[in-house]
Amino acid sequence: MQKLSLRDRIKKARASASDSFRGGKLMSSIFRPGSPFRKGYVDSPRNRSYVVMNNVLYHLHPVKVKRHGVRLSYTLCLGGLSFFLFIVLTITGIWLMFYFRPTELAYVDIQTLQTSIAFGSLVRNMHRWGAHLMVLVVFLHMSRVFYHGAYKAPREFNWVIGVILLLLTLLLSFTGYLLPWDQLAIWAVTVGGNMAGYTPVIGAQAKFGLFAGLEATTATLLRFYVLHVLFLPFIIVIFMAVHFWRVRKDGGISGPL
Amino acid sequence: MVDIPEHLLQRSAEARAKALGISVEQALAEMKGESDPTVISKEPEVKTIDETPAPAAETPAPAAETPAPAAETPEEVDFAPEVKVTQRLLTVVKAKPIQKAVSEPVDKVNTWPHLMLPEFVSLMAMTAFLILLSAILQAPLLEEANPNVTPNPAKAPWYFLGLQELLSYWDPQIAGVMIPLVLGIAIWMAFPYIDRNPETHPSKRKFAIMFYTFFLAGAGVLTIIGVLFRGPGWNWTYPWIDGIWFDDLLDWIHFE
């Protein structure tokens, strides 16, 4: 009998430990059939389908997609990146909520966040630049869709949903703009709110509703805060769900041209 | 009218010939001769064929026509109809799906790994880019909000600066701007219902492409002017001479 070298013995032991763990009851209960984390995963067409079908996140996707659609040059992944940025903003935003009070203390809270809290500055920067990036990416996504004529039948209604999503993105960004409660925030929101005041017929009411008064005060801050962290995300998630669902129901990605 | 396949016709003729005691060729000729000139619709044809073994059992109820075979058929009842079942060709239905397939088969690939891998890579790239950007550039934080001190100029967030620029041109006729703007959003949403051209290739929808590009260029130019070329009093300034009045870029460009 040939004696195994130490390295081979370790290798063998590791493989058997991995197999008994990945094939064990725990992993089989967590991961559904076809998961690469289960024991005995092989790259087969059946398992490729299972990977998508048996995962709650991945099954937003269909099992198969049009070949031209997976080319990066077709979509530039802009829709996916919009969604991903929304997730990044949700995570960093929830983190920021731990350190922020939408009152006269807001400005002090931001200062404290930047100077005395670990990664405070980084997370705030990610949230801010990510928000600007999301506006840009959503806009580019819309332009991509337009240039491909992807809004045409049967996808007309999904374009309407998409425009609503863009407006909601702008509103989310705009309501977040006020929260640092510095001179930049208050005056940008004042200018923006005054523009809303020029809306025909309901201008004055729109402005009053937005500011919770005649000008930007801490009442406005609270209002924008609630809109920003709860109301608008709630609405936008509903519209996003419909948007993604319709992408699939309308026959997947459009094209090829 | 579906053509009866040759082999079925042949089989039918054989059965008929057997039943009537005539030659197969004759039966075939009769069948063909009958069906060609007179009957066009499916129904009479069915009757004609239906009728063949009938003399033994019963004459078909709608005996609209009693064509040639009847005359030739000798009244020989040498089998009980319930015992000997003859095959009868009623009609031929062409093999076709009941439902019409709407979609053409398309070239597809598995989502895993062909879509999800590039997706994952772009998400990682975006994350890396965002973290890097956030590590390098500090988000602006000016003095605490003070309603009594108005900065000059006061600028909206960058995505509204094109609009702010536009409003600065027609300040007295604000309604003249806002009404088209509200209408613009409505038209923008309704665009798929306005543009009924089904073509997607750019060369076949030149107007739509031109329209959008014009809008894009206009929005871009107005935004850039608003961000970079407007200083105190919303007066025209050159960023390379007079500096930039846009506090979002505070950490991006160092003026001194």
Image (cartoon, coloured by chain):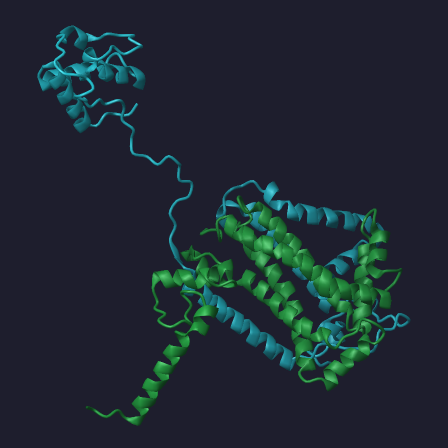
Point out the image quarter for the N terminus of chain A.
Answer: bottom left
The picture places residue B230, in percent across and down from the top left corner, at 77, 67
The picture places residue A115, in percent across and down from the top left corner, at 74, 85
Residue A89 in the figure: left or right of residue A64: right
State whether residue B247 appears in this view: yes
Outermost residue, right side: B148
Residue A213 in the figure: left or right of residue A18: right
The picture places residue A203, in percent across and down from the top left corner, at 83, 51
Residues B16 and A69: in front is: B16
Residue A207 in the figure: left or right of residue B196: right
Residue located at (52% from left, 63% from top): A57
Shown in cyan, the chain is B
Residue located at (64% from left, 81% from top): B136
State whether residue B226 appears in this view: no
Residues A197 and B96: in front is: B96
Outermost residue, top side: B71
Residues A154 and A9: in front is: A9
Residue A251 in the figure: left or right of residue A241: left
Q: How many marks?
A: 0
For chain A, the rendered hue is green
Residues A205 and B23: in front is: B23
The picture places residue B24, in percent across and down from the top left corner, at 10, 19
Q: Which of the 4 image quadrants contains residue A85?
A: bottom right
Q: Which of the 4 image quadrants contains residue A99?
A: bottom right
| In the depicted structure, whether residue B96 falls above or below residue A186 | above
Residue located at (88% from left, 70% from top): B147
